[in-house]
Amino acid sequence: MLIDRPPMGWNSWNTFTNKINDQTIRETADAMVEQGLAEAGYNYLVIDDSWSERERDQDGNLVVCRAKFPHGMKSLADYVHSKGLKFGMYSCAGVRTCMDYPGSFGHEFQDARYFADIGVDFLKYDYCYKPSQADGPMLYNRMSIALKSTGRDILLSACSWGRDNTPQWVRSTGAGMFRSTSDITDTYTSIRDIAFSQLDNLPYSAPGCFNDLDMLVVGLNGNGSIGFGQGCTEVEYRQHFAFWCMLSAPLMLGLDVRNITKEARDLLVNSELLEIDQDPEARPPYMHRLQFNRDGFGDENVRIMFKHLSGGDYAVGIFNFGDEDTGANVRFYDIGIDPMCGYGFELTDVFTGENVGTYHEIYTMKIAAHDCRVYRAKLVQCGHGGL
Protein backbone atom coordinates (compact mmCIF):
# COMPACT_ATOMS: atom_id res chain seq x y z
CA MET A 1 0.00 0.00 0.00
CA LEU A 2 1.54 3.31 -1.10
CA ILE A 3 1.37 5.94 1.64
CA ASP A 4 2.00 9.39 0.17
CA ARG A 5 1.30 11.42 3.34
CA PRO A 6 2.17 10.77 7.00
CA PRO A 7 -0.73 8.74 8.45
CA MET A 8 -2.97 10.47 11.01
CA GLY A 9 -5.32 8.93 13.51
CA TRP A 10 -5.78 7.70 17.08
CA ASN A 11 -4.34 4.76 19.02
CA SER A 12 -5.77 3.31 22.23
CA TRP A 13 -2.52 2.61 24.08
CA ASN A 14 -1.54 5.91 25.72
CA THR A 15 -4.87 6.30 27.49
CA PHE A 16 -6.26 2.81 27.91
CA THR A 17 -3.44 0.20 27.60
CA ASN A 18 -5.29 -3.12 28.20
CA LYS A 19 -8.50 -1.47 29.45
CA ILE A 20 -10.17 -1.42 26.06
CA ASN A 21 -13.65 -2.55 25.10
CA ASP A 22 -16.32 -2.24 22.43
CA GLN A 23 -18.12 0.72 24.01
CA THR A 24 -14.95 2.75 24.48
CA ILE A 25 -13.92 2.30 20.86
CA ARG A 26 -17.36 3.18 19.52
CA GLU A 27 -17.50 6.29 21.71
CA THR A 28 -14.04 7.25 20.50
CA ALA A 29 -15.13 6.91 16.88
CA ASP A 30 -18.11 9.15 17.62
CA ALA A 31 -15.91 11.73 19.32
CA MET A 32 -13.36 11.81 16.50
CA VAL A 33 -16.15 12.88 14.17
CA GLU A 34 -17.97 15.18 16.59
CA GLN A 35 -14.80 17.02 17.64
CA GLY A 36 -13.77 17.67 14.03
CA LEU A 37 -10.68 15.49 14.29
CA ALA A 38 -11.75 13.24 11.42
CA GLU A 39 -12.41 16.28 9.23
CA ALA A 40 -8.91 17.56 10.07
CA GLY A 41 -7.42 14.31 8.74
CA TYR A 42 -7.22 11.99 11.75
CA ASN A 43 -8.88 9.06 10.02
CA TYR A 44 -7.29 5.90 11.46
CA LEU A 45 -8.72 4.44 14.68
CA VAL A 46 -6.31 1.80 15.98
CA ILE A 47 -6.87 -0.74 18.76
CA ASP A 48 -3.57 -1.62 20.41
CA ASP A 49 -2.50 -4.68 22.44
CA SER A 50 -4.84 -6.82 24.61
CA TRP A 51 -7.83 -7.25 22.31
CA SER A 52 -7.62 -11.06 21.98
CA GLU A 53 -7.92 -14.10 24.20
CA ARG A 54 -4.72 -15.34 25.83
CA GLU A 55 -4.46 -18.33 23.48
CA ARG A 56 -5.40 -19.25 19.91
CA ASP A 57 -8.16 -21.74 19.19
CA GLN A 58 -7.54 -25.39 18.25
CA ASP A 59 -7.04 -24.41 14.60
CA GLY A 60 -4.46 -21.78 15.47
CA ASN A 61 -6.75 -18.83 14.85
CA LEU A 62 -6.68 -15.62 16.85
CA VAL A 63 -9.77 -15.26 19.02
CA VAL A 64 -11.25 -11.90 20.01
CA CYS A 65 -11.91 -11.44 23.72
CA ARG A 66 -15.70 -11.57 23.96
CA ALA A 67 -15.69 -10.09 27.46
CA LYS A 68 -14.24 -6.89 25.98
CA PHE A 69 -15.80 -7.09 22.52
CA PRO A 70 -19.08 -8.99 22.87
CA HIS A 71 -20.24 -8.20 19.33
CA GLY A 72 -17.01 -9.40 17.74
CA MET A 73 -14.41 -7.36 15.89
CA LYS A 74 -16.14 -7.34 12.50
CA SER A 75 -19.13 -5.53 13.98
CA LEU A 76 -16.82 -2.95 15.54
CA ALA A 77 -14.89 -2.46 12.30
CA ASP A 78 -18.15 -1.91 10.44
CA TYR A 79 -19.18 0.73 12.99
CA VAL A 80 -15.86 2.55 12.66
CA HIS A 81 -16.16 2.45 8.87
CA SER A 82 -19.71 3.80 9.08
CA LYS A 83 -18.24 6.93 10.66
CA GLY A 84 -15.99 7.48 7.66
CA LEU A 85 -12.92 6.30 9.59
CA LYS A 86 -10.41 3.54 8.91
CA PHE A 87 -10.00 0.65 11.33
CA GLY A 88 -6.68 -0.52 12.78
CA MET A 89 -5.59 -3.44 14.94
CA TYR A 90 -2.44 -4.73 16.59
CA SER A 91 -0.20 -7.79 16.48
CA CYS A 92 3.44 -8.62 17.04
CA ALA A 93 6.33 -10.16 15.08
CA GLY A 94 7.22 -12.28 18.12
CA VAL A 95 5.64 -15.38 19.60
CA ARG A 96 3.75 -13.22 22.13
CA THR A 97 2.69 -9.59 22.18
CA CYS A 98 4.14 -7.13 24.64
CA MET A 99 1.19 -7.78 27.00
CA ASP A 100 1.62 -11.57 26.64
CA TYR A 101 -1.13 -12.35 24.12
CA PRO A 102 -0.56 -14.49 20.99
CA GLY A 103 1.89 -12.95 18.52
CA SER A 104 1.90 -13.61 14.79
CA PHE A 105 5.27 -15.39 14.56
CA GLY A 106 4.70 -18.43 12.33
CA HIS A 107 1.05 -17.43 11.74
CA GLU A 108 1.59 -14.44 9.47
CA PHE A 109 -0.54 -15.54 6.50
CA GLN A 110 -3.25 -16.96 8.74
CA ASP A 111 -3.45 -13.76 10.78
CA ALA A 112 -3.31 -11.52 7.71
CA ARG A 113 -6.40 -13.27 6.34
CA TYR A 114 -8.14 -12.84 9.69
CA PHE A 115 -7.41 -9.10 9.71
CA ALA A 116 -8.53 -8.70 6.10
CA ASP A 117 -11.79 -10.59 6.72
CA ILE A 118 -12.60 -8.26 9.63
CA GLY A 119 -11.97 -5.19 7.50
CA VAL A 120 -8.70 -3.94 8.96
CA ASP A 121 -7.01 -0.99 7.21
CA PHE A 122 -3.97 -0.59 9.50
CA LEU A 123 -1.83 -3.10 11.39
CA LYS A 124 0.51 -1.96 14.14
CA TYR A 125 3.13 -4.70 14.25
CA ASP A 126 5.25 -4.77 17.42
CA TYR A 127 8.62 -6.41 18.20
CA CYS A 128 8.24 -8.11 21.60
CA TYR A 129 9.21 -11.75 22.18
CA LYS A 130 10.95 -12.07 18.83
CA PRO A 131 13.08 -15.25 18.87
CA SER A 132 16.71 -14.17 19.11
CA GLN A 133 17.69 -16.29 16.11
CA ALA A 134 14.90 -14.93 13.89
CA ASP A 135 15.79 -12.15 11.48
CA GLY A 136 13.76 -9.02 12.19
CA PRO A 137 13.80 -7.56 8.67
CA MET A 138 12.65 -10.91 7.27
CA LEU A 139 9.74 -11.06 9.74
CA TYR A 140 8.48 -7.62 8.71
CA ASN A 141 8.93 -8.50 5.07
CA ARG A 142 6.98 -11.73 5.64
CA MET A 143 4.03 -9.96 7.25
CA SER A 144 4.03 -7.32 4.51
CA ILE A 145 3.80 -10.07 1.88
CA ALA A 146 1.09 -11.81 3.91
CA LEU A 147 -1.01 -8.64 4.11
CA LYS A 148 -0.67 -8.05 0.37
CA SER A 149 -1.68 -11.65 -0.34
CA THR A 150 -5.16 -10.88 1.05
CA GLY A 151 -5.92 -8.37 -1.69
CA ARG A 152 -6.90 -5.73 0.88
CA ASP A 153 -4.99 -2.48 1.31
CA ILE A 154 -3.63 -2.65 4.87
CA LEU A 155 -1.03 -0.17 6.08
CA LEU A 156 1.79 -1.98 7.90
CA SER A 157 3.12 0.05 10.83
CA ALA A 158 6.46 -1.52 11.76
CA CYS A 159 6.85 -0.90 15.49
CA SER A 160 10.41 -2.17 15.94
CA TRP A 161 11.56 0.75 18.15
CA GLY A 162 14.59 1.44 15.92
CA ARG A 163 16.16 -1.91 16.86
CA ASP A 164 18.51 -3.71 14.47
CA ASN A 165 19.09 -0.46 12.55
CA THR A 166 15.44 -0.28 11.49
CA PRO A 167 15.67 2.95 9.42
CA GLN A 168 18.25 1.40 7.13
CA TRP A 169 16.14 -1.55 5.95
CA VAL A 170 12.49 -1.00 6.82
CA ARG A 171 11.51 0.73 3.57
CA SER A 172 12.52 -2.40 1.68
CA THR A 173 9.93 -4.47 3.58
CA GLY A 174 6.92 -2.59 2.23
CA ALA A 175 6.01 -0.99 5.57
CA GLY A 176 4.18 2.34 5.38
CA MET A 177 5.62 3.73 8.62
CA PHE A 178 8.20 2.64 11.18
CA ARG A 179 8.95 3.33 14.82
CA SER A 180 12.48 4.52 15.43
CA THR A 181 12.11 5.30 19.14
CA SER A 182 11.43 3.70 22.48
CA ASP A 183 7.95 4.24 23.98
CA ILE A 184 7.01 7.84 24.68
CA THR A 185 5.75 8.94 28.09
CA ASP A 186 3.75 12.00 29.11
CA THR A 187 6.84 13.84 30.31
CA TYR A 188 8.91 16.61 28.81
CA THR A 189 12.10 14.59 29.26
CA SER A 190 10.66 11.89 27.01
CA ILE A 191 9.63 14.39 24.34
CA ARG A 192 13.06 16.03 24.36
CA ASP A 193 14.95 12.72 24.29
CA ILE A 194 12.94 11.48 21.32
CA ALA A 195 13.40 14.78 19.48
CA PHE A 196 17.18 14.71 19.90
CA SER A 197 17.33 11.03 18.91
CA GLN A 198 15.82 11.71 15.50
CA LEU A 199 18.38 14.07 14.00
CA ASP A 200 20.33 11.17 12.46
CA ASN A 201 17.14 9.65 11.02
CA LEU A 202 16.07 12.63 8.93
CA PRO A 203 17.12 11.08 5.57
CA TYR A 204 15.08 7.90 6.07
CA SER A 205 11.54 9.31 6.12
CA ALA A 206 9.78 9.99 2.82
CA PRO A 207 6.57 9.25 0.92
CA GLY A 208 6.01 5.51 0.95
CA CYS A 209 7.46 4.95 4.43
CA PHE A 210 7.38 7.55 7.21
CA ASN A 211 9.42 7.72 10.41
CA ASP A 212 7.08 7.27 13.38
CA LEU A 213 8.19 9.13 16.54
CA ASP A 214 5.47 7.33 18.56
CA MET A 215 1.99 8.46 19.50
CA LEU A 216 1.32 12.04 20.53
CA VAL A 217 0.92 12.83 24.22
CA VAL A 218 -0.80 16.17 23.57
CA GLY A 219 -3.79 16.56 25.86
CA LEU A 220 -3.04 13.67 28.20
CA ASN A 221 -2.36 16.09 31.07
CA GLY A 222 -1.07 13.32 33.32
CA ASN A 223 -4.06 11.06 32.68
CA GLY A 224 -4.02 7.71 30.94
CA SER A 225 -1.48 4.94 31.34
CA ILE A 226 1.84 6.59 30.44
CA GLY A 227 1.72 9.70 32.59
CA PHE A 228 3.87 10.60 35.54
CA GLY A 229 2.58 13.39 37.76
CA GLN A 230 0.80 16.23 35.98
CA GLY A 231 2.02 15.49 32.48
CA CYS A 232 3.29 18.38 30.38
CA THR A 233 2.40 22.05 30.12
CA GLU A 234 0.46 23.50 27.18
CA VAL A 235 3.72 25.11 26.01
CA GLU A 236 5.50 21.74 26.05
CA TYR A 237 2.66 20.05 24.18
CA ARG A 238 2.86 22.82 21.58
CA GLN A 239 6.56 22.22 21.07
CA HIS A 240 5.99 18.46 20.92
CA PHE A 241 3.31 18.72 18.22
CA ALA A 242 5.19 21.31 16.18
CA PHE A 243 8.40 19.24 16.18
CA TRP A 244 6.52 16.16 14.93
CA CYS A 245 4.98 18.30 12.17
CA MET A 246 8.33 19.75 11.09
CA LEU A 247 9.62 16.19 10.65
CA SER A 248 6.53 15.11 8.66
CA ALA A 249 5.93 12.40 11.25
CA PRO A 250 2.76 10.31 11.50
CA LEU A 251 0.32 12.01 13.87
CA MET A 252 -1.36 9.36 16.02
CA LEU A 253 -3.35 10.81 18.90
CA GLY A 254 -3.08 9.18 22.30
CA LEU A 255 -5.45 11.23 24.46
CA ASP A 256 -9.03 10.36 25.40
CA VAL A 257 -10.74 12.27 22.59
CA ARG A 258 -14.09 11.97 24.41
CA ASN A 259 -12.74 14.47 26.96
CA ILE A 260 -10.50 16.63 24.81
CA THR A 261 -9.82 20.15 26.08
CA LYS A 262 -10.23 23.23 23.92
CA GLU A 263 -6.48 23.90 24.14
CA ALA A 264 -5.59 20.41 22.91
CA ARG A 265 -8.18 20.44 20.14
CA ASP A 266 -7.13 23.87 18.86
CA LEU A 267 -3.53 22.73 18.67
CA LEU A 268 -4.27 19.39 17.01
CA VAL A 269 -6.44 20.90 14.27
CA ASN A 270 -4.14 23.88 13.58
CA SER A 271 -4.38 23.92 9.79
CA GLU A 272 -1.01 25.60 9.26
CA LEU A 273 0.87 22.97 11.27
CA LEU A 274 -1.06 20.15 9.63
CA GLU A 275 -0.20 21.54 6.19
CA ILE A 276 3.48 21.42 7.14
CA ASP A 277 3.18 17.85 8.39
CA GLN A 278 1.12 16.72 5.39
CA ASP A 279 3.10 18.57 2.73
CA PRO A 280 3.20 16.34 -0.38
CA GLU A 281 6.98 16.53 -0.73
CA ALA A 282 7.53 15.48 2.91
CA ARG A 283 11.07 16.80 2.86
CA PRO A 284 13.17 16.58 6.02
CA PRO A 285 14.15 19.94 7.49
CA TYR A 286 17.48 21.50 6.69
CA MET A 287 19.28 21.99 10.00
CA HIS A 288 20.51 25.51 10.70
CA ARG A 289 24.04 25.45 12.07
CA LEU A 290 24.43 25.74 15.84
CA GLN A 291 24.02 29.39 16.68
CA PHE A 292 26.62 31.32 18.67
CA ASN A 293 26.02 34.23 20.97
CA ARG A 294 28.17 37.33 21.29
CA ASP A 295 30.48 35.54 23.75
CA GLY A 296 31.20 32.82 21.21
CA PHE A 297 29.28 30.06 22.94
CA GLY A 298 26.61 28.03 21.19
CA ASP A 299 23.32 27.10 22.84
CA GLU A 300 23.12 23.36 22.34
CA ASN A 301 19.49 23.34 23.49
CA VAL A 302 18.28 25.41 20.53
CA ARG A 303 17.42 23.68 17.26
CA ILE A 304 16.54 25.67 14.15
CA MET A 305 14.95 23.94 11.16
CA PHE A 306 14.25 25.15 7.64
CA LYS A 307 11.83 23.06 5.60
CA HIS A 308 11.05 23.22 1.88
CA LEU A 309 7.30 23.01 1.18
CA SER A 310 5.51 22.31 -2.07
CA GLY A 311 4.24 25.37 -3.90
CA GLY A 312 7.32 27.43 -3.18
CA ASP A 313 6.84 28.29 0.50
CA TYR A 314 9.03 27.24 3.43
CA ALA A 315 8.63 26.54 7.12
CA VAL A 316 11.00 27.77 9.81
CA GLY A 317 10.96 26.17 13.25
CA ILE A 318 12.93 27.36 16.30
CA PHE A 319 12.87 25.03 19.31
CA ASN A 320 14.24 25.77 22.77
CA PHE A 321 14.72 22.46 24.54
CA GLY A 322 16.53 24.14 27.41
CA ASP A 323 15.18 24.79 30.88
CA GLU A 324 15.72 28.56 30.68
CA ASP A 325 14.44 31.31 28.40
CA THR A 326 16.95 32.25 25.74
CA GLY A 327 17.54 34.49 22.78
CA ALA A 328 17.62 32.80 19.40
CA ASN A 329 18.39 34.00 15.92
CA VAL A 330 17.88 32.67 12.43
CA ARG A 331 20.80 33.77 10.28
CA PHE A 332 19.59 33.54 6.70
CA TYR A 333 23.11 33.17 5.34
CA ASP A 334 23.23 29.75 7.01
CA ILE A 335 20.20 28.58 5.06
CA GLY A 336 21.29 29.98 1.71
CA ILE A 337 20.26 33.66 1.57
CA ASP A 338 23.28 35.90 1.07
CA PRO A 339 22.68 39.40 2.54
CA MET A 340 23.39 41.00 -0.85
CA CYS A 341 21.21 38.73 -3.03
CA GLY A 342 18.16 41.00 -2.89
CA TYR A 343 15.84 38.45 -1.32
CA GLY A 344 14.44 37.88 2.13
CA PHE A 345 11.70 36.01 3.90
CA GLU A 346 8.26 37.26 4.86
CA LEU A 347 7.37 35.40 8.07
CA THR A 348 3.91 34.49 9.35
CA ASP A 349 3.47 32.93 12.79
CA VAL A 350 1.56 29.64 12.35
CA PHE A 351 0.12 29.79 15.89
CA THR A 352 -1.23 33.36 15.82
CA GLY A 353 -1.50 34.12 12.11
CA GLU A 354 0.51 37.31 12.68
CA ASN A 355 2.72 38.59 9.89
CA VAL A 356 5.89 39.44 11.78
CA GLY A 357 7.61 41.19 8.89
CA THR A 358 10.18 40.64 6.16
CA TYR A 359 13.83 40.01 6.97
CA HIS A 360 16.81 39.56 4.67
CA GLU A 361 19.76 38.88 6.98
CA ILE A 362 18.78 37.79 10.47
CA TYR A 363 15.66 37.26 12.53
CA THR A 364 16.06 37.41 16.31
CA MET A 365 13.55 36.54 19.00
CA LYS A 366 13.24 35.64 22.66
CA ILE A 367 11.99 32.12 23.19
CA ALA A 368 10.78 30.67 26.48
CA ALA A 369 12.04 27.44 27.99
CA HIS A 370 10.50 24.35 26.35
CA ASP A 371 8.74 26.55 23.79
CA CYS A 372 8.99 26.97 20.05
CA ARG A 373 8.27 29.37 17.23
CA VAL A 374 7.14 28.16 13.82
CA TYR A 375 6.71 30.40 10.78
CA ARG A 376 5.49 30.03 7.25
CA ALA A 377 8.10 31.78 5.12
CA LYS A 378 7.66 33.32 1.67
CA LEU A 379 10.68 34.26 -0.38
CA VAL A 380 10.30 37.91 -1.47
CA GLN A 381 12.44 40.51 -3.19
CA CYS A 382 13.41 43.24 -0.75
CA GLY A 383 16.42 44.94 -2.25
CA HIS A 384 19.95 44.84 -0.88
CA GLY A 385 19.00 46.83 2.18
CA GLY A 386 16.05 44.67 3.24
CA LEU A 387 13.87 45.84 6.11
Image (cartoon, grey):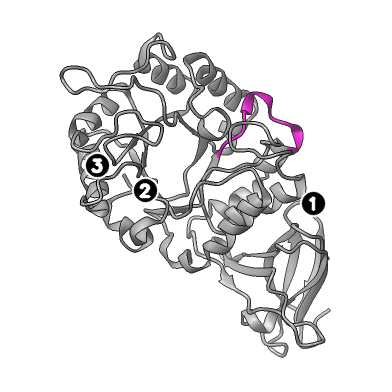
Q: Nearer the viewer, mark 3 or mark 2?
A: 3
Can residue 269 be seen in the rendering of this structure?
no
Q: Amino acid at mark 3?
A: Met
Seen in the picture, residue 87 relative to 385 is either above or below; the reply is above
Disc on res. 352 = 1
Determine the residue positioned at 37% across, 42% down.
126
* Callout 2: SS: loop
Disc on res. 257 = none
User: Is residue 198 or residue 282 the one in the foreground?
Assistant: 198
* Callout 1: SS: loop
- Local packing at callout 3 (Cα closer than 10 Å; few below 14, some 14-19, many 20+) is many
Q: Earlier in the sequence, mark 1 or mark 3?
A: 3
> Which residue is labeled 3 in the image?
143
View extreme (left): residue = 59
* Callout 3: SS: helix
User: Is residue 164 or residue 41 the one in the foreground?
Assistant: 164
- Circles 1, 3 touching at the beta carbon (< 8 Å): no
Work out which quarter of the rendered image holds the N terminus and state it: top left
Q: Amino acid at mark 1?
A: Thr
The CA distance from mark 1 to mark 3 is 44 Å
Determine the residue positioned at 62% across, 28% down.
256
Left or right? Give the position of 15 relative to 378: left
Can residue 263 be seen in the rendering of this structure?
yes
Q: Which residues are magenta?
A: 253-263
The CA distance from mark 1 to mark 2 is 33 Å
- Residue 85 pos. (x, y %): 47, 28
